[in-house]
Amino acid sequence: MSESLAITKLSDLANPTRFLVLASRVLPWLSAVTALLFATGLYLSFAGEGDYQQGLTVRIMYVHVPAAWLSMMCYTVMALSAIGTLVWRHPLADVAHKTAAPLGAAFTLIALATGSLWGKPMWGTWWVWDARLTSVFVLFLMYLGLIALNRAMDDPGKAARLCAILILVGFVNIPIIKFSVDWWNTLHQPASVIRMGGSSIDASFLRPLLVMALAFTMLFFTLHIAAMRNEIWRRRVSAQRRMAARMAGDKPGLTTEKST
Amino acid sequence: MAALLLRDLKLSVRAGGGALIGVLFFITVVAVIPFGVGPDLNLLSRIGPAIVWIGALLSALLGLDRMFQTDREDGSLDLMLMQEHPLVLTVLVKCLAHWIGNGLPLVIASPLLGLFMNMDEVAIGATMLTLLVGTPALTFIGAVGAAVAVTLPRGGLLVSILVLPLAVPVLIFGVSASYAAVEDPAPFLPPFLILVAITMFFAVLGPLGAALALRNADD
Amino acid sequence: MAALLLRDLKLSVRAGGGALIGVLFFITVVAVIPFGVGPDLNLLSRIGPAIVWIGALLSALLGLDRMFQTDREDGSLDLMLMQEHPLVLTVLVKCLAHWIGNGLPLVIASPLLGLFMNMDEVAIGATMLTLLVGTPALTFIGAVGAAVAVTLPRGGLLVSILVLPLAVPVLIFGVSASYAAVEDPAPFLPPFLILVAITMFFAVLGPLGAALALRNADD
Amino acid sequence: MSHTFYIAMSYGIAGLISLCLIAWVWLDGRARRRELAQLEAAGIRRRSATSPAPEGGKA
Amino acid sequence: MRLIAENLSARRGEDLIFQGVSFALSRGESLVLTGKNGSGKSTLLRVVAGLLRPESGTVIWQADTADKGMRAAEACHYLGHRNAMKTELSVHENLTFWQQFFGHSPQGESLSVDEAADAVGLGDITHLPFGYLSAGQQRRMAFAKLLVSFRPVWILDEPTAALDVSAERVFTGLIESHLRNGGILIGATHQPLGLENAQELKMAGFTGIAEEVW
Amino acid sequence: MRLIAENLSARRGEDLIFQGVSFALSRGESLVLTGKNGSGKSTLLRVVAGLLRPESGTVIWQADTADKGMRAAEACHYLGHRNAMKTELSVHENLTFWQQFFGHSPQGESLSVDEAADAVGLGDITHLPFGYLSAGQQRRMAFAKLLVSFRPVWILDEPTAALDVSAERVFTGLIESHLRNGGILIGATHQPLGLENAQELKMAGFTGIAEEVW
Ligand code: HEM
Ligand SMILES: Nc1ncnc2c1ncn2[C@@H]1O[C@H](COP(=O)(O)OP(=O)(O)OP(=O)(O)O)[C@@H](O)[C@H]1O
Ligand SMILES: Nc1ncnc2c1ncn2[C@@H]1O[C@H](COP(=O)(O)OP(=O)(O)OP(=O)(O)O)[C@@H](O)[C@H]1O
Ligand SMILES: [Mg+2]
Ligand SMILES: [Mg+2]
């Protein structure tokens, strides 16, 4: 089985039309699973008792940590789609990283907001310029920059390719966020769940945390697939509009249409 | 003239120049500072007004040089020079559009940055006020530089020598007025009034100088 | 390639005056800080390296957006894209020319500013050395932003936004190496070597990314 | 302020942002679907192009 | 209505490009400048348009409605080598801007933006960003700018460069109707514009170095 | 030596501008593109020059000296609407730069900068800044760029726009001698270039919208 055959198969699967069919089929299921996970996660997080050190505020962790993880995962998803755009020039990859940017920005915003809400009772201040916090803030700015770049260009293909390059170059920030706590001694908690040598967190906190993390992940995928579907529809509409205008004008060679 | 204002505003929003980006840039600049200075909140709040002002000056400088250049490169400037509207007015409107598109958003965003820099309310208010009064002066000074730059095919260096020294007083009085508002012994009003005077002075001199430079740009 | 280097250097001296405005801005930024911090010489010398580095970072942003834009506007970029020289090399040479025209003057001016900030000789030397090693990284990172924004008529601010987040590590290690040279317990070499590594990393990644972006900005 | 306040705020803000996202995706999808329906009603369909599909479009 | 040039001379750098150029044009008359590359056609047009200070001589605009001190430039439309349109804005926005900026002129009637675009044969693409047009389409749209606000004098510098044959005919037609309506035309071209009764002025280029001063 | 285009198609924005364009040119042959404004001439030239990625199809350059994988663009000179010269530098500096940047080609001989300027009839003003030249003079100097370093294929997009008649003749002469020396030409024009034996390709413009993807 040759490699090219595998690639054709993959791109066949990822054909926009087929994607639409697939999306409509899985979206209801995904939404249901997400809702179920959130219900369980919320129940677990409010049923458990507080930490001896951090009191009840440990409950913020169940939102903060999954959101923080997702803010990085979303960027990783974008980086993978960026490779798809640049290497295979696949239109679906364009759509994937374009629609992921606002989602990533939103999750980063959640992590920032809940983090500073946690910081006030724990550290006594809303915001400190420590490495972890600032690098997450920088990630937020990068999401906004990518959104701005996407909006500044009106040829979607070109915008996708240029954004893809920037996403890949900006990927260096992700390890910085992840390891910033190890490189600089800061106020922020070092990694205790995902790290070498196994988790060091108590199981009674771990269970709700993992369920909530799963719930957030499912939420991301549900929204992402739905947003991709929207984007495909948007492009389809604009293509058909241009076609229609062209038919109406019927002056071949003189006219061009470009919907905005 | 309203048409010109509108067009220039549209241009500044349309393509990568807009309010959103200016503010984003401003935030980014300020966010970078603590990396250098370190997370010492006291120190940050002390240098806060200066940093916010420097950020504003920088974003003002970044867009300025292209103020007339794009119009010259595509030939629009020729047509503007031919009209009966007094050229000074045209320049003034272009300055205004530039300030609304690039300066005002900075003023509006400055309180947020003040919070980041851990400044107290008075300092934030004072900085915002001085920015509101001072940034137009930067635009007017920049207009002269931009106009001179347009005219001289090899005059680039002259522009830089021209613009920054003139902008420095604005920066100095802006910063010192902001500080005066917080620190007790120093009175707020004198430097602030000087700032107002500088802005009004350049509001007249800037467009006049720019118009003169453009008229002599004959080529 | 030597021809390209020479041409770009000539252009940077002839028009636009990137070098001078960069240095002037650098001096201005550094000169304004004492207004904020007050005349406390100890404090000044303590934050000196950080301020000098921040000033250099911000001035490096000033000319970046025009790095490829002028060549695109007059069609030169088209011809460069067609040549058999690998595009990466062309970009590298353009970065080099840009650095010599805009970055090197900053490095040379930095001791003067160190004196302003009341820094001692070791600190000044260390800051200059870290700037010499670190500013090329800023140029290389900036090249990616400039290439991405080359088709945008007013890409200036957008470039800086895209570039600044990536420049943060450079700033962090530059500043911490400068501090390490003065403060005894911290060793100078580790952060300095990391800075060297970052510069070398971006010396590869920057031109590659920029070349890729230029190829894809086709129109 | 009590810890409950911070917890409530955290969950509140997280919920609000998530709800905004969901609403945005939902409304956007509805609007696009409506536009497609309008085009359909106007008799404009896909594959009405005079040209064969460029590569990648062999649906 | 008369446009009078008296004894014009102009410098470029230190070179005197032309000397003692005089002409007078009244309603419906046109003047076509010809000559080699670099012979000073564009220079003369820019002098007439008031964009370049003449070394000596004056350009005068006489009309019933005009004030005594009115600069001749204000009665003119100038179409130079560059199109004076923003690539980022749509064609419609560009034309609307110029219409409003030029203002309404009482001396003649102006077309609406859409009519003007129709007149140059590109009525249905005014919503496109100007930068998306081909070279010739851009030139046509730049010409449409002359139609959206009336000015008696048209100063055209190689209007038909980059145009296809049908567009050239369209331009000639528009110029002729402008002349019929009492307009005045000064143009520089390398290809004949196909105008009847046009005066012709052959530029010779470089007439001396402005060394007298020293 | 052959330049072969196979089944090219290209998009602008979302529009397919042309489809299935194929041609093959060998030594001394030339191809002239004609068609209305906006019909895709410039687009096709940019595709051949490798500046625009074709939607499908390839451009191949076959020569004894060429490596297998050599991009066709490397054998080409491209003269587009923009002159690729810096207004701040003198003509001489500009031409010298391009000569060095293009490098020496073993396949044919190149002129020196002064000879090239002479060849386009402007030998005596190479010391002027490029920005000081008239439109036609600028165009001529841009053409001189093709002479300072030999490339077998010339891709010219409306080379004669803004030129006077004598300069047009000069250009035709230079192109003919290039063809006689075994060169290849692809050009787009609205005015006939006066070449004998030139193949002609008429562009029709817009052939469809690339909508199937979605
Ligand atoms: C705005 C402020 C904050 C931001 C931007 C932030 C950001 C992050 C990020 C990015 C992670 C994921 C790290 C990883 O996976 O390695 C994380 C995890 C975590 N954060 Fe925060 N945080 C903030 C404030 C806080 C505060 C105030 C606390 C508690 C005192 C806190 C406690 C934690 C904990 C316990 C983890 C889990 C670490 C692990 O198990 O890996 N965070 N935070
Ligand atoms: N950058 C661009 N983005 C989108 N569409 C474009 C772009 N440039 C050109 N087009 C469109 O592509 C089509 C072909 O343009 P092209 O420049 O190839 O025409 P042309 O044949 O060279 O015309 P002319 O004779 O006027 O130069 C035109 O309809 C134009 O509107
Ligand atoms: N900005 C300038 N500075 C100095 N000299 C200039 C400038 N512009 C043009 N010249 C010189 O003035 C002379 C006349 O130029 P002009 O543009 O008027 O020629 P033209 O007749 O329009 O030529 P073309 O047919 O090529 O457009 C030329 O010799 C040119 O070198
Ligand atoms: Mg001319
Ligand atoms: Mg063309």
Image: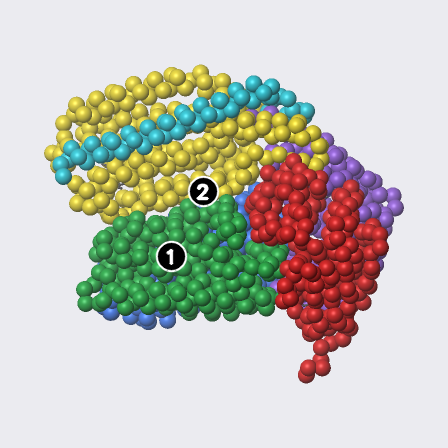
Chain colours: A yellow, B green, C blue, D cyan, E red, F purple
Q: At 17% across and 45% down in the image, what residue appears? A: A124
Q: Position of residue E110 (x, y in %)?
A: 66, 47
Q: Residue at x 49, y 56 (%)?
A: B93
Q: Residues within 10 Å of mark 2 (few under 14, many from 20)?
A: many
What number is the disc on residue E162? none
Q: Nearer the viewer, residue F86 or B143?
A: B143
Q: Residue at x 43, y 57 (%)?
A: B60
- Residue B43: x and y in percent read 24, 58
Q: Is residue A250 above or below residue E64?
A: above
Taking the image as shown, residue F145 lies to the left or right of residue A129, namely: right
Q: Which residue is mark 2?
A: A148
Does the residue at mark 2 contact the one at mark 1 (Cβ under 8 Å)?
no
Ligand 2 quadrant?
top right
Mark 2 residue's CB less than 8 Å from ligand 2: no
Residue E195 seen in this snapshot: yes
Q: Is residue B189 left or right of residue E35?
A: left
- The location of residue A171, given as percent across then percent down, is 41, 41
> What label does residue B56 carry, if any?
1
Seen at 78% across and 41% down, the residue is E166
